[in-house]
Amino acid sequence: MPASLSASRDSAVVGLFRHSKVGAVASSIEATHPMDESSNEVLLDEMPTPDGLIELVAYRSGGTVWVGVRPKGWSHEESPVEYAIGLHTGSEEHYVEATLSMHRAWGVAFGAVAPEVERVAVRNDQRDVFPAVIIPLPAFLDEDYRAAWGLATNCGGRCELIGYDQNDRLIAPQTRRTGERRVLSASESMELLRQHCDDGLRHYTWVLERPSVPEQEGYVQAVRNGLYAMALVLAFVEGAPDERTAMLDAHEITLRYVESVKNEGWEPPFMHG
């Protein structure tokens, strides 16, 4: 069965193997699935590369839909494709389920994207963006995700498939799929920002109020800086009309959280398992 490493964070189960990684993009590994178990393959597209034409292929095997690439004229004796990714094989679904095949300074990012993705592109590690295409999968595969791929040059070692929603907002490869990506109202966005600041301020305050450990002394100032920066943002959320007022309010906010964390006996969730 083909095995590849998905570019999506936590989407780590591919083929017969389970890989653990955090926010990493790993190169595909060579496919080893016998051809006779994927006779329902379909050729989706062709693309010229510096090394010649390559093909994008999809097929179902072992209950999983696979999207893979191979050089034109690829021998089918051992595997239908050279590199492949199985869809929906991770612990979470992502809007973009993709991997890559690197060849010196160029690479191909390929996989599939959710219906909420309106367009795609490929980005190299210098953040240069290259065109990519979305290709519907045939009905017999019974898959609402669509195949997607593109080629990037000037790669330092990686490239990635990225998507954009109906409002042309970027969808990064690690973005967990939660359904339609609607535009939040100003009040909804402000409430999310307030919650984020509240969580961060509580955590920073709790850390600074704990007995210091000599090995951690070098991090104390960074935590204080983070606390103040978070308080400054919350000051604007709470209505500070200008920078000077926000700076004064931020000081009061930090004192407020020191008192609140102490009186409530607040602790971060990880302290309770």
Image (cartoon, rainbow, N blue to C red):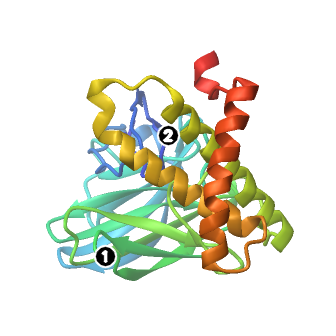
Depth check, front residue: 200 or 83: 200
Amino acid type, callout 2: Asp
Above or below, 111 relative to 224: below
Q: Quadrant of the C terminus?
A: top right
Amino acid type, callout 1: Ala
Q: Secondary structure at mark 2?
A: loop
Q: Which residue is mark 2?
A: 10
Residue 47: horizontal and vertical position, in percent? 35, 77
- Residue at 45% of width from left, 60% of height from top? 57
Above or below, 48 relative to 246: below
Q: Secondary structure at mark 1?
A: strand
Residue 23: horizontal and vertical position, in percent? 42, 48
- Residue at 46% of width from left, 48% of height from top? 224
Left or right of 163 in this view: 151 = left
Quadrant assignment, res 269: top right
- Label 2, label 1: how far apart the Cα atoms are: 24 Å
Quadrant assignment, res 271: top right
Residue 185 seen: no
Depth check, front residue: 216 or 51: 216
The tag earlier along the polypeptide, 2 or 1, is 2
Circle on res. 152: 1
